[in-house]
Amino acid sequence: MRHKVLSCRISLFVIFGAFLFTPLEKSFGYPAGSNCWHLNSALQAKSNADVVCKVQVLSVCRGGLFKGGLSNPAQDMARMIATSKVLSVIKGKCPQVIDIEFHYSKDRDLKLSHPLWQLYTELSEGEVCIVFLKEAKPYYKLNRIRSKLRVQPKVVDYNLGNTPKLRLLSEFLAGCKSKDEMVRLQAVEELGYLGDAMIGEISSSPYRDSKEVLKRCLKIDSGLSKSRQIIRKMRSSENLVIKSVSIISSFQLDDSPGIDGPLELLRMNHARFDPNASLKKYGIRDFSISSLQLKLLETMDATTRRFIVNLKDLSVIRRKDGRSPFRGVRGFDYAAFYKQALDCEVVKNTEAMRRAIANVIWIRYEERSVPEMIRLLDDPTIHIRRTAVSALRKCINSDFSNSWELRKDGSGFGKSDEKNLEGRLKDYQDNEQQYIQHWKKWWQENKNRF
């Protein structure tokens, strides 16, 4: 039975969302790993680079000194110039040979080995990489962080299209076939970022009906299809980290990995690859089992915040009821997955993971997830309990109604004119047990339906 709803029928997604969203060189960024791993090349190419190109470093020489670096107080830094041959251009225009400026610590001995992370902000003679550059005449400047990709050293045919995203996509598809583990790992991670960016670009375009956009969409569709094909192969990798990252990227690419692989990752013992092992091998702790588990659930959450467009005819894919957009990855059984995920010890012990699960259950509000909504009413975190109440309200009463409008006079518990977010949050906090008890009572009367 539906309860009375507010006459304005404010969309819950807008109101509630405000608080829900909340040799080849060992090149690793500063601080540890940040410059390369999780680069998000689509974002860097669009927002933080005038020129993106693939280069071979011919020589490196030391220039003058200046005060800089990331330490406080500033330290003496050496200005370095890497003369580089441009093998291909991904964004912008530049000569065939360019000088790239980057920085070393003044006391750095170039002949000695150094921590892995230092080499992600630097270039070395002979290496081939993609660089994200700012024009700073007479040189091009390598950004201090997130400025360098390890790739296949050979020249790649940019046959998918001429946009920066499609050229980068060609590089990462080639990188997935590399014998170099580091190149393969970065390729599968960047395929996810890039796929998510391309899907988002199409779904948010206000000009989706134009012939020009349709033509571009067909090229993107071809690129996404190739990405999904290769990511499916990478999900079978014998390398634990590459396999796990491929599963995560699958959600960004809108390609269901099935529930077995993600559940296997959630159930994995952290000792198999702990933060210290990750730091030693990759120069960053983020590829440990514990970090990958959290990233999986947070990525699943993030990829339900977009809607999916059928790139063949540019129509928005909708739920079975035909009213609201479909949220998430097509073909993935979220209800079955979260039913088992909530039983995993790591999820029970990690608030951020339960929060990510609650968010997706709220966004999708499937009837099959009602038992999990009821279960989350007993979560120790108020945000998660509140999200569960809201999910029940959307699912059982009305998908357009407010989250908690049951009131003492029969229309709700709080003030009848309470519509703003701050007031509604306070109303919930003041009357939380009444809301929770209402839904628990409802569950006892209706659980046989589920």
Image (spheres, grey):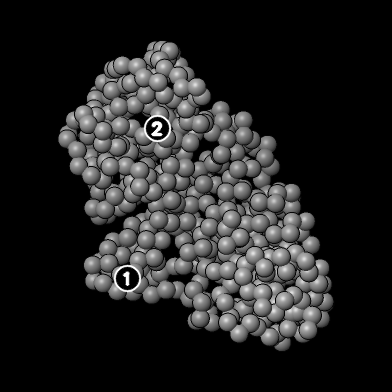
Quadrant where the N terminus sits is bottom right
Residue at numbered disc 2: 144
Q: Quadrant of residue 211?
A: bottom left
Residue 125 on image: x %, y %: 30, 22
Q: Which residue occupies the foreground of this view, 336 or 279?
A: 279
Kindly identify the residue that appears in the image at 26 percent across and 53 percent down: 163
Residue 264 on image: x %, y %: 63, 51
Q: Amino acid under label 2?
A: Arg
Kindly identify the residue that appears in the image at 39 percent across and 71 percent down: 310
Q: In the displayed orientation, state which residue is furthest to the left.
A: 95
Q: Is residue 95 positioned above or below 208 on the image?
A: above
Label 2 vs 1, first from the N-terminus: 2
Kindly identify the residue that appears in the image at 26 percent across and 21 percent down: 59
Circle number at residue 208: 1
Q: Is residue 117 positioned above or below 300 on the image?
A: above
Secondary structure of residue under mark 1: loop
Q: Amino acid under label 1?
A: Arg
User: Dot 1 surroundings within 10 Å: few (below 14), some, or many (20 or more)?
Assistant: some
